[in-house]
Image (cartoon, grey):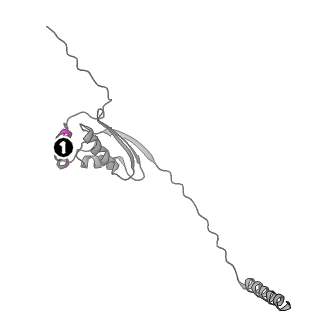
Amino acid sequence: MKKVILSVAVIVAMGLTSCKNETKIVEETTTTEVSKEIAMTDLSFGVRGNCGMCKNTIEKAANSVEGVTAANWDKDKKKIDVSFDSSKTDAMAIHNAIAASGYDTEKVAGNEEAYKNLPGCCQYDHDMAMNQSGDVKADHHTNND
């Protein structure tokens, strides 16, 4: 029994002695979180087009620009509403992407080759008004005898 107690005492003493000689280095790591605010911009501008297929193509072109979070083209108003992160893109990049798909915007004429490849229903009148208020004007026909 004495041998067991003596053996345990020797093991404990060796363990304490070896721990005492080791130097523990504790590194303190600090993490700094950088809060980067997203600079969201909402923009509306005119885009010529005719139908639901135009809507899909125009919105797809706008959404293909990095930083664009939402795009909604209104067929009746000939206007697109776009939300984008201005730290990643700008308005002209969106105009250029839509124009590359064949559609005229207020600032950039549509790519003529892309326009020719649009379906017949999507080949709009290049003189049509854009960015309309959306008010539908009724045609007034009067009979003057």
Q: Position of residue 105 (x, y in %)?
A: 27, 42
At 27% from the left and 45% from the top, the residue drawn is 57
Quarter of the image with the C terminus in it: top left
Magenta-highlighted residues: 114-136
Q: Quadrant of residue 132 in the image?
A: top left
Q: Is residue 131 visible?
A: yes
Q: Position of residue 49 (x, y in %)?
A: 24, 38
List the single residue furthest toward the right: 2
At 32% from the left and 29% from the top, the residue drawn is 134
Q: Which residue is mark 1?
A: 119
Q: Position of residue 124 (x, y in %)?
A: 20, 38
Q: Amino acid at mark 1?
A: Pro
In magenta segment, residue 117: yes
Q: Is residue 140 above or below residue 135?
A: above
At 24% from the left and 48% from the top, the residue drawn is 101
At 25% from the left and 46% from the top, the residue drawn is 99
Q: How many marks?
A: 1
In terms of depth relative to the viewer, which is nearer, 108 or 25? 25
**Magenta part mainly helix, strand or loop?**
loop
Left or right side of 4 for 67: left
Q: Quadrant of residue 18 in the image?
A: bottom right
Q: Position of residue 62 (x, y in %)?
A: 32, 47
Q: Is residue 105 visible?
A: no
In magenta segment, residue 1: no
